[in-house]
Image: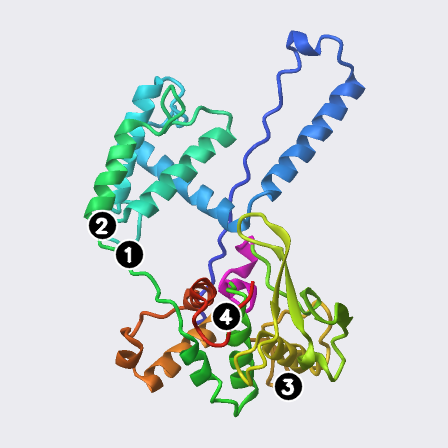
Amino acid sequence: GRRQIRRRTYSPFILTLPQTDAPTFRNSTVATRNTLVGDLVTAETLHEGAVTRKTLEDRDRALRRWKSYAKSIGITDDIWLDHLNRADRIKIFGAFAVALRQGRFSGPSHDSLVESTIRSTVSYAAQAFRENDKPNPTRDDDGELGVLLSRLYRSFGNKDPAEKQQKALPARVLLEIAKLQHTETQRAISQLTIGAFYFAMRSCEYVKVPAAEKRRTDIVRLRNVVFRRNATIIPHDSPDLHLADFVSITFEMQKKDEKSDRVTQHITHHEIMCPVRAWAAIIKRIRSYPGADDDTPVSAVWRNNRIEHITSQNIISAIDNAAEAIGYANLGVEKGDFGNHSIRSGGAMAMALDDAPPPFES
């Protein structure tokens, strides 16, 4: 039989209303109280919408782990630790961090969790306390992280293996990718990798990534890409699109809540490594697809007689194949050193060093 797909859900927190029998509301009427309730409900709805679904799921997972731990040590009627003082709450959460370190609430493949995962889980659990109008159980009287937790994190971090950082991608690899132009997918990958390189883009900004709907960053769409020549906007259907002086991309929503951030690059006149040429090719290619419009993501590719999307895995495979063709030793890296973040870091490094042909402009 077919394996059942388990859908992840998160539990919304219950809206707690102020006590309307308090002296503050002595002169309140039924109508004014109804107004207050309506405003409170709206505030709660907007409050929940301020974070991504992934954040809500992470918070809910952390809360479940905290409740499991509390039950395992005999705390069943005081989940929010209302009857403990601040110092004791910090101690209990220090013990919770140790249990997380030992992987007690993780799958069988996790013998031990690293410091960053533990810190994140504890932080999300503490956030759940605050969401329920309870004191943060990890903070001392000065509002600082408790000394016990701070030292535990340092101890965990000292014992964790060094995190392997993805290497910055050199333009040489992009030129190797560009040699393969036999299929629509190969053309799309070459155009996207070069275009993303010049704008130091996150993978979720130009290709389809897992759980994209849970991320704060929006993918770039055709409407976000604008070409100019002599300060005049060139329409997407112009045959001279690739001759524009500049190409600008407006990033509508980014990871740190930055909105409508516009970045511009100018033409390099290089046959391949040129942001204007790359993005003009992307726009022309996608605009030729039936059904494509201003809202179509730049990840679009025509396959199987329909619009599909280039994925982050497609990009990783192309990078690996190109690096292997060049030779990892010739690049000064090892297999597995490159990933989706390598294009962003490679573009940023090239702009910072300003010594990689052709010149880069921000």
Name the residue furthest left: 159
In the rendered image, the vertical position of residue 280 relative to residue 62, given as above or below: below
C-alpha span from label 3 to label 2: 49 Å
Residue 207 seen by the camera: no
Q: Amino acid at mark 3?
A: Asn
Image location (x, y in percent) of residue 117: 34, 47
Amino acid type for the residue under numbered disc 4: Phe
Nearest the viewer among 8 and 170 is 170
Mainly helix, strand or loop, the magenta region? Answer: loop
Q: Which residues lie in the magenta part?
A: 202-216
Q: Residues within 10 Å of mark 4 (few under 14, many from 20)?
A: many
Q: Residue at x 24, y 36 (%)?
A: 152
Going by the image, does 276 lie left or right of 6?
right
Residue type, numbered disc 2: Asp
Identify the disc placed on residue 197.
4
Q: Which residue is drawn at the image coordinates 31% and 50% (left, top)?
A: 106
CB contact under 8 Å: marks 1 and 2: yes
Amino acid type at circle 1 is Glu
**Disc 3 designates what residue?**
305
Residue tagged 2: 160
Label 4 or label 2, whichever lies nearer to me, is 4
Please rate how many residues cluster around mark 3, counting C-alpha atoms within 10 Å: few if below 14, some from 14 to 19, many from 20: few
Q: Position of residue 337 (x, y in %)?
A: 32, 69
Task: Please indicate whether residue 202 sits to the left or right of residue 218 in the image.
Answer: left
Q: What is the spatial separation of the Cα atoms under label 4 and label 1, in whole angstroms?
A: 24 Å
Magenta stretch contains residue 211: yes
